[in-house]
């Protein structure tokens, strides 16, 4: 069975959904939308697996260590829900054995979200991110699992690392780079996924990302959609807590930009997701 829509990168496993997690998942499934929940460290990866196994079909998990959690890093209350809200962690040491055990679960479809995040990162933090990124690529190679990539202000470096180490393919979630950077990943066999930001109107000063050019020029068979819930809800839900069912707004916007039918884009995205994740 194939759904109409798929959100390939969500975090319904985060604390932001503690009050109504099952309702959020059921709302997605009732609206013919499948969900892949993504871990950011051991605790949230474990939670993603537990959540996926509550449902017979349509809910999957990705497990891994987010680059910002490889060193002392900022968290917000939507992720882990610590008392006092925002806090800084000491960082997690990537343990291949823990994640290797996680991957034995049949609902785990990829490794991540891993990658590089240079936003406000200092040199020593970048070095640690690169080291952990390579370890997760090696684990993906070993177990023949695709990679779920988080990349911020580091597309060139991330692609160079993949070209050196990766034997598997994957997806760059919440892509926000240039057309040239997107083509680099696509040419290497990685899909690019677009999130709610593509529905935002351009800034009056002309700054910000220019998604239309990228989306117009990327082949439909290399495009995916994600919400990154609970963050960055698309128009018309902007400013609210995001959730997987809103992924249809991203599909709608891609169809508008590419001048294609919404049903055609929706089918292509689901087909692409099934191909890369083996679901």
Image (cartoon, grey):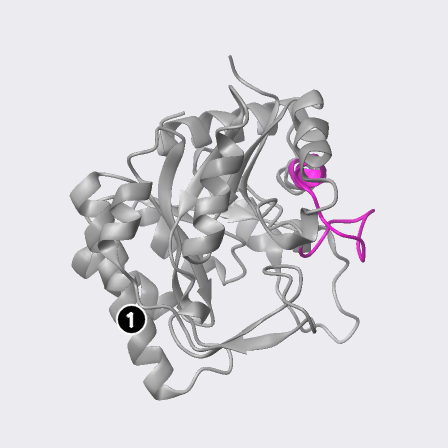
> Judging from the image, what secondary structure is the residue with disc 1 in?
helix
Task: Judge from the rendering whether residue 186 lies leftward or rightward of residue 229; answer left or right.
Answer: left
In the rendered picture of this protein, how many numbered marks are placed on residues?
1
Residue 93 position within the rendered picture, expressed as x and y whole percent measured from the top left: 31, 68
Q: Residue at x 24, y 44 (%)?
A: 168
Residue 200 position within the rendered picture, expressed as x and y whole percent measured from the top left: 74, 56
Answer few, some or many: residues within 10 Å of disc 1's Cα (few below 14, many 20 plus, some between 14 and 19): many
Q: Is residue 7 visible?
A: yes
Task: Judge from the rendering whether residue 142 lies leftward or rightward of residue 191; answer left or right.
Answer: left
Residue 260 position within the rendered picture, expressed as x and y whole percent measured from the top left: 64, 30
Q: Residue furthest bottom?
A: 123
- Majority SS type along the magenta span: loop
Q: Residue at x 43, y 77 (%)?
A: 90
Q: Nearer the viewer, residue 80 or 241?
A: 80
Based on the picture, tell me whether residue 113 belongs to the magenta stretch. Answer: no
Q: Nearer the viewer, residue 191 or 5?
A: 5
Quarter assignment of residue 162: bottom left
Q: Is residue 39 visible?
A: no
Q: Residue furthest top?
A: 1
What residue is disc 1 on? 130
Compared to 161, does 47 lie above or below?
above
Q: Nearer the viewer, residue 218 or 49?
A: 49
Q: Residue at x 77, y 58 (%)?
A: 201
Based on the picture, tell me whether residue 233 belongs to the magenta stretch. Answer: yes
Q: Residue at x 35, y 79 (%)?
A: 126
Residue 167 position within the rendered picture, expressed as x and y whole percent measured from the top left: 18, 47
Quarter in which the C terminus is drawn: top left
Magenta residue span? 231-251
């Amino acid at each position: 069975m194939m759904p109409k829509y798929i959100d390939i990168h969500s975090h319904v496993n985060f604390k932001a959904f503690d009050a109504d997690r099952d309702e959020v998942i059921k709302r997605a499934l009732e609206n013919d939308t499948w969900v892949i929940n993504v871990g950011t460290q051991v605790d949230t990866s474990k939670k993603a697996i537990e959540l996926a196994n509550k449902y017979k079909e349509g809910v999957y998990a990705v497990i891994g260590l987010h680059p910002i959690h490889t060193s002392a890093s900022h968290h917000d209350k939507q992720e882990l829900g610590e008392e006092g809200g925002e806090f800084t962690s000491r960082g997690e040491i990537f343990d291949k054995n823990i994640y290797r055990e996680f991957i034995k679960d049949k609902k785990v479809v990829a490794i991540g979200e891993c990658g590089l995040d240079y936003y406000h990162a200092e040199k020593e933090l970048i070095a640690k991110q690169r080291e952990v990124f390579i370890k997760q690529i090696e684990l993906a190679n070993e177990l023949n699992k695709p990679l779920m990539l988080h990349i911020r202000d580091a597309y060139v470096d991330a692609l160079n690392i993949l070209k050196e180490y990766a034997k598997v393919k994957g997806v760059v979630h919440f892509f926000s780079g240039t057309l040239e950077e997107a083509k680099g990943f696509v040419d290497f066999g990685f899909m690019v996924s677009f999130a709610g930001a593509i529905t935002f109107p351009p800034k009056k000063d002309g700054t910000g990302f220019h998604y239309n050019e990228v989306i117009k020029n990327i082949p439909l068979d290399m495009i995916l959609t994600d919400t990154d819930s609970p963050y960055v809800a698309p128009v018309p839900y902007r400013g609210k807590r995001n959730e997987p069912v809103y992924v249809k707004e991203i599909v709608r916007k891609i169809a508008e930009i590419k001048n294609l039918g919404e049903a055609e884009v929706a089918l292509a995205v689901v087909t692409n997701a099934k191909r890369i994740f083996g679901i």
